[in-house]
Amino acid sequence: MHLGVLIFPTDTTLQPVELARAVEERGFESLWFPEHSHIPVSRVTPWGGREGAPPLPEYYWHTHDQFVALAAAAAVTTTLKLATGITLVAQRDPLWLAKEVASLDVISGGRMLFGVGYGWNKEEMANHGFRYTDRRAMIRESVLAMKELWTKDEAEYHGEFVNFEKSWSWPKPIQKPHPPVILGGDAGPKTMRDIVEYCDGWMPIAGRHSFRDKVDQLRRLAEESGRDPDSIELALFQAPPKAEVLEPLAESGVARAVLALPQGSPGEVLDALDSYVPLLDAVGR
């Protein structure tokens, strides 16, 4: 099992350059950065879209730009995989996003993991000019359009939300055909269809959903759709940093566990990172 770590890259904790160096030095596989463009003060959507959720933590509106932070991390590392966990694709222009993903992959020497998700903050989405109910279709079209840009010299796409005529767009990613597209979040029937259609992996948040049952359903749907179920990589986000939890997951075929770091002082972040190091010997690779 690969072991990665995640943190909101903010101006109030250990900065991306220092963190990336520390994560790579300790032998972790990947570093994951979430994102939010902004958080409307008038927000009424509960945290994560879950009724009864506690107040939203302040670090949500202190995040650096995801791709700027990962590019800085790329500059000071050589083996560490650089991951978005997740990119709010519907809030980003797909033509620019395709270039950002490809540029990071080239600059890092092919180390980019592209985690994507639907998002939950209705007010944030409204400020970007679209309806919450359209986000799923927008992400689907954006990813399919980006794949055209990444893999073809002359790319075009014509959908409901994404439209462009034959176009040139470089650089092309180093990873072929493109960096892995990994969908985060729970997987109901619609999400499972999305995973099977255009994703290379699925990475739900640990502990929120019936993971094993969903994996079995996802594999059945892949088979029914003519796709090899083993071509969909399984991972867990915010996995418990406990060997007794991670070992059975690794044995069952989960390829990656991503451990959350605290949104504390630089010293607190490094202490937590050091506390996870024994897991590399127990379950990591």
Image (tube, rainbow, N blue to C red):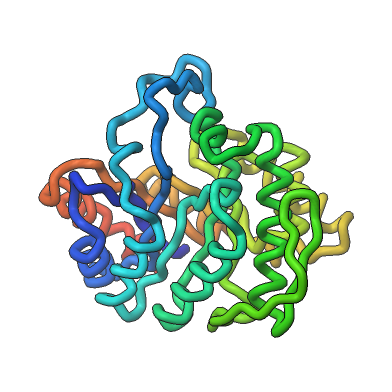
Residue 12 lies left or right of residue 81; in this view the side is left
Q: Position of residue 273 (x, y in %)?
A: 23, 55
Instruction: State the residue at coordinates (87%, 63%).
Output: 226
Question: Image height check: is 19 above or below 46?
Answer: below
Residue at the spot 60% in from the left edge and 52% down from the top edge:
183
**Image point (70%, 76%), residue name:** 167
Relative to 242, 114 lies left or right = right
State the image coordinates of residue 279 (x, y, percent, origin top left). 32, 57
Q: Which residue of the protein is positioned furthest toward the left in this rendering? A: 267
Q: Quadrant of residue 38?
A: top left
User: Is 93 in front, or is 118?
Assistant: 93
Q: Is residue 262 above or below residue 29?
A: above
Question: Observer-nearest residue: 260 or 91?
Answer: 91
Q: Quadrant of residue 141?
A: bottom right
Q: Residue furthest top?
A: 52
Relative horizontal placement of residue 175, taking residue 242 as reference (left or right) = right
